[in-house]
Amino acid sequence: MTVKQGKDIALIIGAGTGGLLAAAALAPHFKTVRILERDTLPDVPAIRKGAGQAAHLHSLLLGGLQIMERFLPGITQELTLSGAKCLRAGIDQQIHEYGIWLPERDLGCSILAQSRYLLEHVIRSRVTQLENVSILDGVRVGNLTLDGVGGIAGVRLAEPDGEAREMPADIVVDCSGRGGKFVRQLNELFPGMDRVDEINSNIVYASAIVDKPESLAESRENILIIAEPGASAGGALLDIEDGRWFVSLHGRNGLVPPTTPSEWVEFARQLPADRIYQRLIQARKIHPVALYKKPLSTWRRFDLMPELPFRYFPLGDVITSVNPTFGQGMTVGFGHAEALHDAFSDHDDIGLAQSDYIKTSAAWSQKAWRVCAAYDSSFDGHAAKKNYELLRALSQKKQAEIFTSPDRHLEWFQRAQMYSC
Ligand SMILES: Cc1cc2nc3c(=O)[nH]c(=O)nc-3n(C[C@H](O)[C@H](O)[C@H](O)COP(=O)(O)OP(=O)(O)OC[C@H]3O[C@@H](n4cnc5c(N)ncnc54)[C@H](O)[C@@H]3O)c2cc1C
């Protein structure tokens, strides 16, 4: 491993999926990469406070897996050895949109299915095996420290005893999630940092882990039923480790799914198709139902700023946090991590790497944003009805094509999976 001069320490705030991949992507470029995480990280796969969204179904798109393999070779195999399920694309994945099920056809590849906490656990154990990467958990970054000449100098930790400890860095990668605490801090000194585009997503998730019935022990499925404005309930079911399904049901336009297990199962009947309901009524056990409200999708427009504070690199949900229906969030963060790696491969100079990174990471955000904006516009605002009709017509055209052409089916699948050939 050759380390270029002047890049001693990269600090990463947050050990979510974005922060972990960022560490793997930066490891070849910096002598030391250190992740700072406020949670005490569990030794086993488990939901933790700082990543509470892990109580909901997380699909890992094929494009995300492709990027993980680039930086953590062999991780697909490790995930399957840890219990992740291999689902045959086009066969095991069943998608219902605008009144029909997409065709069943073997697309010649597989997707991986697991809980978000298993995924994070496996990535974390791989990342900590990298010799120049470490994770300091149970420490909260209080704020960023400034260098007085237009940049940041590092971070200040907020110690439980009230003491503050400073850590200098050559770059700080902000992977602290969608809240944007550090963006708000920087905005006071660098106005314009908080420019954010928003879309009303107005979606409420209600999710539970479900023990599968014995009769379906060998089945492998990912069912996705897209909500439509006329029937504002949607949902997804995903086979995960330990003989379980992860099931997320959601409501839109003010429809809030119930959290009492029996009522929650009944809610699954309201979806535009009843396949998830048919699975749920056979369940051995339904674990507690967790609720998550996502009123807005957000895109912080760092790409439109003439210049960012020197040494500051936002990544993942800090930049874009989109409606989860299409499972894009983690993959977009991985795309940002890849952009970060490539920017430092192309530039020795941190400033040049930063401006390159901001442009290329925005391209990933844009892809997810387009999907989210098109879909959410059919639920919201004056033009919702017109947008819905347009979207449905486009979708029906696509459906007609993919029913007749295996090539178009594969192309569509790869685009939806943010996969690059
Ligand atoms: C209901 C729901 C369902 C979703 N479904 C999917 C899906 O199917 N597929 C998909 O790809 N994505 C999905 N997502 C999106 C996905 O969860 C996010 O895109 C992804 O987790 C973002 O990763 P991140 O690393 O940027 O942020 P996070 O995962 O939010 O991680 C941020 C980390 O920073 C830490 N932190 C914050 N502040 C500090 C501080 N001051 N000091 C130290 N540490 C700090 C936090 O503790 C946390 O560990 C879903 C989201 C939701 C809400």
Image: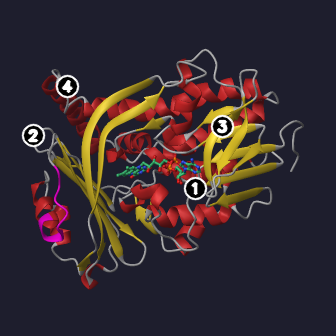
Q: Position of residue 184 (x, y in %)?
A: 52, 31
Does 127 sit above or below residue 373? below
Q: Residues within 10 Å of mark 3 (few under 14, many from 20)?
A: many
State the residue position of label 4. Answer: 387
Q: Specify the amino acid type for callout 1.
A: Arg
What amino acid does circle 4 point to?
Asn
Circle 1 packing at 10 Å, graded few (<14), some (14-19), many (20+), is: some
Dot 2 beta carbon under 8 Å from ligand 1 = no
- Using the rendered image of the protein, determine whether residue 419 is visible from the camera's viewpoint: no
Label 4 secondary element: helix
Q: Earlier in the sequence, mark 2 or mark 1?
A: 1
Q: CA distance from mark 2 to mark 4?
A: 13 Å
Magenta stretch, main secondary structure, is loop
Q: Secondary structure at mark 1?
A: loop
* Label pair 1/3, CB-CB below 8 angstroms: no
Q: Residues within 10 Å of mark 4 (few under 14, many from 20)?
A: some
